[in-house]
Image: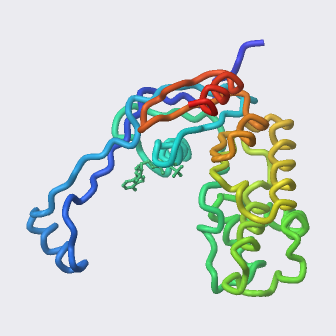
Amino acid sequence: MEKELIIKVDHVSMKFNLASEKFDSLKEYIIKSLKKQVSYNEFWALKDVSFEVYRGESLGLIGLNGSGKSTMLKTIAGVLKPTKGSVSVLGTVAPLIELGAGFDFDLTARENIFLNGALLGYSREMMNSYYDEIVEFSELQNFMDVPVKNFSSGMVSRLAFAIATIGTPDIMIVDEVLSVGDFRFQQKCEARIRSMMDRGTTILFVSHSIEQVESICNKVVWLDHGVLKRFGDAEPICNEYKNS
Ligand SMILES: Nc1ncnc2c1ncn2[C@@H]1O[C@H](COP(=O)(O)OP(=O)(O)OP(=O)(O)O)[C@@H](O)[C@H]1O
């Protein structure tokens, strides 16, 4: 059977401009900025990165702190536009990047379920049909009418994970979220990710746990200072990474 291309990352480079001097106040920065007196250092977080992902694969991104993993995922999620090159994504994407980022902390958990659903592009009817499943998975049955500002960070993550993983998206981006919550809940999240993979969802996964990457992913991208160091089957690359 012909493999179906689902993501194509084509010669992607990403530049950030970092102000090269310190400012004592926002006012000083704005004035200097308007007078064009602010100088910037160019910083390339990704340098000419290319790889492809096929339907049903699960791709891990590995590399040291600051190597560009999150930046890469954000360009695939469409949050960042690459400075050079292009990213084509052929399917729906569920980004689990900053869990709880779309919450209004003054609203209750129940209200946030519908708010978050709307942000993810889901209708009220769809959220109604998934409501019980979200509550059950998050194990927050007794807290649905409590404002989210009173939740612990683990509770926020549980609710956000339960909302973000409803349905069967073509691609799911999982950035470090398996490190939230307690150990038992992490295992429950991992099981849910596996069942989505079984239903054909392609997973893009970032974790500092190389064991987790090895157990979930069959392909790996290894980034080193924004450069693609290795791309291919997970096992040999993870072994090389562990020994590096
Ligand atoms: N919005 C931004 N503005 C300026 N620099 C940025 C921005 N986002 C990321 N960077 C820089 O780009 C580099 C890559 O960051 P990125 O978050 O992609 O790395 P990472 O591999 O995910 O790191 P970690 O493992 O620590 O999460 C870092 O040096 C970071 O400081």
Relative horizontal placement of residue 163, taking residue 228 as reference (left or right): right
Here the colouring is rainbow
Relative image position of residue 140 (x, y in whole percent): 85, 75
Left/right of residue 47 with respect to residue 183 in the rendered view: left
Quadrant placement of the C terminus? top right
Residue 127 quadrant: bottom right
Vertical order, 198 against 154 (above or below): above
Give the residue at x 9% y 63%: 37
- Residue under the point 59% across and 38% down: 62
Look at the image and tell me in which quarter the N terminus lies: top right
Q: Is residue 108 above or below residue 29?
A: below
Is residue 139 shown left or right of residue 38? right
Question: 101 and 4: which one is in front?
Answer: 101
Count the numbered circles shown. Answer: 0
Residue 47 appears left or right of 25: right
> Within the image, what quadrant is residue 159 found in?
bottom right
- Determine the residue positioned at 80% across, 34% down: 200
Task: Residue 108 in the image: state x and y as whole percent.
Answer: 73, 83
The quadrant in which residue 235 appears is: top right
Q: Nearer the viewer, residue 134 or 46?
A: 46
